[in-house]
Image (tube, helix red, strand yellow):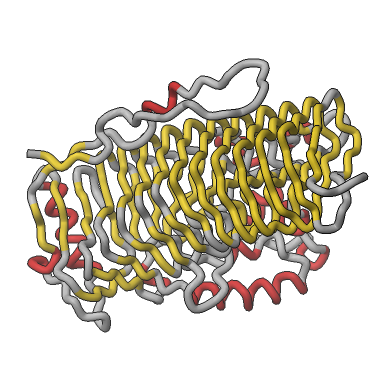
Amino acid sequence: MVILFSCTPVRQDTQFEWGELPCQPDFAWTNHVGSRQSLGDRIFSANSFGAKADSTILSTDAIQRAIDSCAISGGGTVVLQPGHYQTGALFIKSGVNLRLDKGVTLLASTDINCYPEFRSRIAGIEMTWPSAVINIIDEKNAALSGEGTIDCRGKIFWDKYWTMRKEYEAKGLRWIVDYDCKRVRGILVERSSDVTLSGFTLMRTGFWGCQILYSDHCTVNGLTINNNIGGHGPSTDGIDIDSSTNILIENCEIDCNDDIICLKAGRDADGLRVNRSTENVLIRHCVGHRGGGFITCGSETSGSIRNILAHDLTSVGTSVLLHLKSAMTRGGVVENIYVTRIKADSVRRVFGAGLNWNPKYSYSQLPEDYQGKEIPEHWKVMLTPVAPPEKGHPRFRNIHLSQVQVSNAQEFISASGENDTLCLEDFYLYDIEALVCKAGRISLTRHFNATKIKLDTQDAQPIELEQNEASNIRIDYVNREF
C-alpha cells in the first residue's frame, strides 16, 4: 500500500475564450504539471522521538530525528499528536511526508540562530541566507500535508526590516536593505522534484511564504496563507515560483502584504549568469485577498518566464490582478502568459505592465560614502553591471487576459513599454467588464489588442493612448460620451 499525491496526469479544461488570435494556444503541457510522487504508508510518531506539545521548549531535534528515521527506513509519514510545538528549521527528506493533522500547530522559533545559513537564492541573487522553517532541499518524492498550522511568528523580522529600511534609505541604500536584513522564509523547496504541499495553514512568515526554487514537478494544493496577522509584514509573498518548471498551484487562499502568486527567474547579472527559466505553471481555483499582484511576473525576469496559465480566480482587495514588472537591467523574456475567468472586487488596478518598475529598489548604486571601502560579497553581486547593457533589456510579449468581471477598481490599466524599440508586443485583452474610477493609460506598444471591453469610468475620461503601433483598442465606455 502506498499514499499517492497527484501521481496521475492533470486533466485540464482548455475551452477558454481569448478573442481573435493569430493562432490558438496549445495547453498540452498542462496535462503534465505537478508532482508524480508515491510515498510509503509507514507511520512514524515524532512524539516517540521526544517531540513535546509544549510551546515553551524546542522540539526541533526530536521532529528531525523522526524525519531522518522515516527516510532511512524507506519512507512513510511523520505525524504529531495534537498540540503546539516550538521548532526551528526542519528538513524533510526524500520519501517522507510530514503530516500536520488538525489540531497540530508548529510554532516557529523567533531566534534566528535556530535557522542555519546556507547558500540559496533570495530576491533574484544567490547568497548566504537563513534556512526556512520547513525545507525540502535536494530531495525527491517528499510532502508536507495535513490540516494543521505553521505559525512562523515573523513579526520580529518585520519590525527589524522596517527599522533597517528607515536607516538604509537615509544612507542611499534602499536597493540593498532587503538583502542585508536576513529574514526567515516559511517554506523552501530547492533543487527538488515531485514535491507536494497540501492542506495546511501557513501564517505570519518572516519573509516569503512558500518559495519553490530550481525545482520541477511540484504541487501546491489547498493551502491557506495569511501573512497579515498582527502587523504589516514586508515582502511576505504568498507563493513564489522561482526558476522552476511543471508546477501546479490550485485551491489556495492567500492574504499577504506583497505578491500573492509570483513567477520569478533571477535578477540582473547574477540571474543572467544562472539563466534558468520559470515555465509550465498552471494556477487554478485560487482566492486572493490583500497583497500586490494576484498573478505577478517579475520583477526578477532574467532567466525568462513563459507558459503560464491561470484561470478561475477570485480576488477581493488585491492591488493588481495581473502584473508584469521588470527593470532595464533584468533582461529575460516574459511570454505566453494566459490569465482568464476572474471575478474581482475592490482592487487597485486590473492590469499593469512596465519595464522600469520601482527604480529605487531596482537599480543598485553605491553611495559616495562607501566608495573605496570593503563591502559585503552580496553587495558586489548586486553592483555587478550587465554587459553589454542591451542584455539587460527585458521583453514582454504574447500576453493574454480575458473573461474578467471587476467591481470597484481604482484603475483599469497602466501598460507602457520603455521606448519605440522596447515595446510591449502582442497583448490581447478580451471580454472584460469593470467599474473603475479611471481608465488609465496604454503607451509604447506594438500589436496591442483590447476588444469586447466594457468600462464604467467615474471620472468620465477615456484611456490615454500614446505610440501604440498597429494596435486594435476598442473600448465601450458605459453611459459616457467622449
Figure quadrant of the C terminus: top right
Q: Is residue 295 left or right of residue 409?
A: left
Q: Quadrant of residue 23?
A: top right
Q: Position of residue 111 (x, y in %)?
A: 39, 76
- Residue 130 against residue 164 in the figure, above or below: above
In this view, the residue in front, 213 or 467, is 467
In this view, the residue in front, 76 or 309, is 309
**Residue located at (83% from left, 45% from top):** 441
Please say whether residue 40 is visible from this viewpoint.
Answer: yes
**Residue located at (48% from left, 74% from top):** 229
**Residue located at (55% from left, 70% from top):** 233
Please say whether residue 365 is visible from this viewpoint.
Answer: no
**Residue located at (41% from left, 74% from top):** 153
- Residue 112 against residue 429 in the figure, above or below: below
Q: Hey, which residue is sitting farthest front in the picture?
A: 479
Q: Quadrant of residue 163?
A: bottom right
- Residue 252 against residue 158 in the figure, above or below: above
Q: Hey, which residue is sitting farthest bottom in the picture?
A: 56
The count of marks equals 0
Q: Position of residue 284 (x, y in %)?
A: 45, 42
Figure quadrant of the N terminus: top left
Q: Position of residue 312 (x, y in %)?
A: 49, 42
